[in-house]
Image: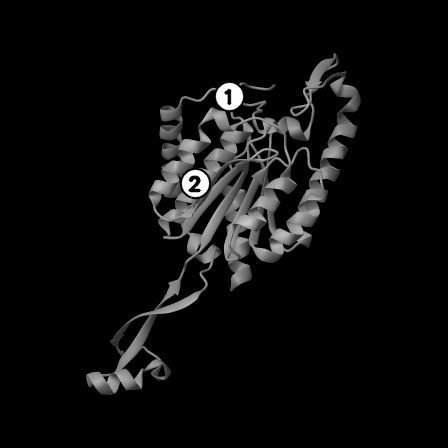
């Protein structure tokens, strides 16, 4: 069933803040720094040498000047920029359960952005349909988090056609090469050589694809009668008997999902599949663990 988006702005922001705090308190974003590595190490200060230190790290020049053994201390040089590319097309304003796909994705984007900004990194975002409808360049500080969630609960940005290729072309031209790009979409309605642009993105950026689907995107309900289905982009309708086409429908969905996942993985990007009637915490945490292991 297609729902009309009805969000009161201040209540939506309040709800997202509560959800983010709850998720953060579970440790969901606690390993962020180990998952998204900085670009190197930078010198922070000297400290006295101790018996537990390796003698090879003594800075002899500084030690002679100070008349005590000193070692250099380094901190990770972050300067990371994480950019969220979020699908807000008409197919995202759908939910066969209480939560619309755009609400589910909004909660995930809010939680991840909090982790990014709380680590001192930069976060930015763009909402897209068949064009970019809102673009906020990466910036630091939790004011950026409030900007994101205020945007995510604003109904005026939602609805329209879908063109992932246009969003990827925009991102390729707009962002610096050191960025992490997180693409959040149901990936319904793909066209126009999108695989080519995924490959180009993965060559330039650290890319993560996140597919969020409603249960009805995966299978049809058991029903002997006829139901009306509507294309979310064209508005065209068709009468179908769910029981007679369910197997073909599920087989088609599985083929499409595999094609999308393979396109990301073959390009060298990460990819995770989510479903809106299940928490995103475990699959996203598993993705973080896999990335952390790969970086060791």
User: Which residue bears the numbered disc 2?
Assistant: 111
Assess disc 2: are there few (<14), some (14-19) or many (≥20) residues with their C-alpha within 10 Å of its C-alpha.
many
Assess disc 1: are there few (<14), some (14-19) or many (≥20) residues with their C-alpha within 10 Å of its C-alpha.
some
Residue drawn at point x = 55 percent, y = 19 percent: 3
Q: Using the rendered image of the protein, determine whether residue 29 is visible from the camera's viewpoint.
A: no
**Would residue 180 be found to the left or right of residue 65 on screen?**
right
Among all residues in the image, which is located at the extreme top? 225
Residue drawn at point x = 27 percent, y = 74 percent: 46
Pick the quarter of the image with the N terminus: top right
The image shows residue 18, relative to residue 203, as above or below, that is above
Location of residue 14 in the rendering, given as x and y in whole percent from the top left corner: 35, 29
Location of residue 107 in the rendering, given as x and y in whole percent from the top left corner: 46, 35
**Would residue 202 be found to the left or right of residue 26 on screen?**
right
User: Which residue bears the numbered disc 1?
Assistant: 5
The image shows residue 82, relative to residue 245, as above or below, that is below
**Would residue 224 be found to the left or right of residue 13 on screen?**
right
- Marked residue nearer the N-terminal end (2 or 1): 1
Q: Using the rendered image of the protein, determine whether residue 55 is visible from the camera's viewpoint.
A: yes
**Would residue 92 be found to the left or right of residue 44 on screen?**
right
Disc 2 versus disc 1: nearer the observer: 1
Q: Secondary structure at mark 1?
A: loop
Residue 14's disc is none
Among all residues in the image, which is located at the extreme left? 67
């Amino acid at each position: 069933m297609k729902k009309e988006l009805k969000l009161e702005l201040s209540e939506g922001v309040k709800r997202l803040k509560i959800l983010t705090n709850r998720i953060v308190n579970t440790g969901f974003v606690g390993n962020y720094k180990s998952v998204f590595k900085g670009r190197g190490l930078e010198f922070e200060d000297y400290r006295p040498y101790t018996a537990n230190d390796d003698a090879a790290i003594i800075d002899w020049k500084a030690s002679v000047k100070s008349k005590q053994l000193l070692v250099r201390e380094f901190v990770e040089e972050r300067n990371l920029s994480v950019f969220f590319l979020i699908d807000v097309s008409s197919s995202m304003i759908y939910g066969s359960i209480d939560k619309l796909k755009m609400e589910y994705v909004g909660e995930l984007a809010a939680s991840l952005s909090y982790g990014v900004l709380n680590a001192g990194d930069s976060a930015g975002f763009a909402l897209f349909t068949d064009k970019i409808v809102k673009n906020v360049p990466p910036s630091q500080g939790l004011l950026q988090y409030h900007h994101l969630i205020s945007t995510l609960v604003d109904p005026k940005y939602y609805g329209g056609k879908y063109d992932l290729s246009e969003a990827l072309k925009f991102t390729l031209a707009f962002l610096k090469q050191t960025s992490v790009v997180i693409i959040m979409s149901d990936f319904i309605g793909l066209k126009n050589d999108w695989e080519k642009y995924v490959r180009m993105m993965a060559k330039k950026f650290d890319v993560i694809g996140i597919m969020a689907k409603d249960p009805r995107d995966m299978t049809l309900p058991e029903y002997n009668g006829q139901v009306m289905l509507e294309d979310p982009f064209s508005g065209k309708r068709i009468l179908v008997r769910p029981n007679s086409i369910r197997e073909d429908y599920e087989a088609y969905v599985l083929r499409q999902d595999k094609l999308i996942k393979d396109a990301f993985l073959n390009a060298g990007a990460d990819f995770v599949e989510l479903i809106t009637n299940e928490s995103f915490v475990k699959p996203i945490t598993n993705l973080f663990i896999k990335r952390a292991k790969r970086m060791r």
